[in-house]
Amino acid sequence: MTGETILPSRPDVPKRRGRQRSLVVQAAILKATGELLEKKPLREITADAIARRAGVSKATLYKWWPNKNLIAVDAFEARMNEIVPIPDTGSAEKDFIEQFKSAIDFYKSPGGRIICQFIAEGQSDSDLLALFRERFVKPRREGPRLMWQRGVERGEIRPDVDKELFLDLIYGPMIYRLLVGHCPLDHTQAEAIIAAVFQGMKAIPS
């Protein structure tokens, strides 16, 4: 596939009188989609099934999302945002340890392991992979980028370190272990991974 994939924008928040009702309906749709993804592979879930579980019409789904994949990615991101906050402990290393542990707990849960489906399906569906990067990966990296920036400003992290490389060194092993399962992934490993990365990235006192 050539050229840039044009992704649809996120559902607009209605500004008319039915705004609160619309937010409630959208939340019900995302919740229903997340529940279905815990039970079935993404490829087996239909828009009809999502609509039935959410108690809405299929036309209501398409009012805000053009396809089921978009609903699935948004549902996954909404669930992770709810469960995995971005801490501010005053220490970049502690922030990453705390956030990393909660991310591991989420990804190892039935709802969190859906990330493996998105990555696997994306290998044969470039549109889905582009969608996943744009709607999930990019916004989810903003929080860790903020933790990195705070660490640089406090003199905890070397300013010459590329932040994207820094984040990949932390989160890459987690995704690899989730997909392959060759090594354990728990809180002890979270602390070991963060310690190893920070060992090479810590700012040297002048």
Image (tube, rainbow, N blue to C red):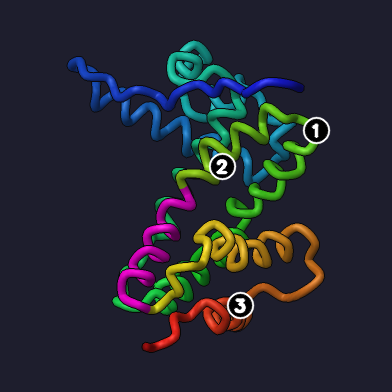
Pick out the residue farthest to the bottom: 205
The x, y position of residue 110, in whole percent, is 63, 54
Badge 2 crowding class, 10 Å Cα cut-off, few under 14, some 14 to 19, many 20 or more, is some
Pick out the residue farthest to the left: 17
The x, y position of residue 57, in whole percent, is 49, 15
Q: Name the residue under label 2.
A: 35
In percent of the image, x 51 and y 67: which residue is there? Answer: 161
Give the residue type at disc 3: Ile
Within the image, what quadrant is residue 47 found in? top right
**Label 2 secondary element:** helix
**Label 1 secondary element:** loop
Q: In which quarter of the image is the N terminus?
A: top right
**Apparent side of residue 42 relative to residue 70 in the rendered image (left or right):** right
**Label 3 secondary element:** helix
Give the residue type at disc 2: Glu
The x, y position of residue 28, in whole percent, is 42, 33
Magenta extent: 140-155
How many angstroms separate mark 1 from mark 3 (CA)?
Answer: 31 Å
Magenta stretch, main secondary structure class: helix
Q: Mark 3 points at which residue?
A: 193
Pick out the residue farthest to the front: 206
Q: Mark 1 points at which residue?
A: 124
In percent of the image, x 73 and y 62: which residue is there? Answer: 176
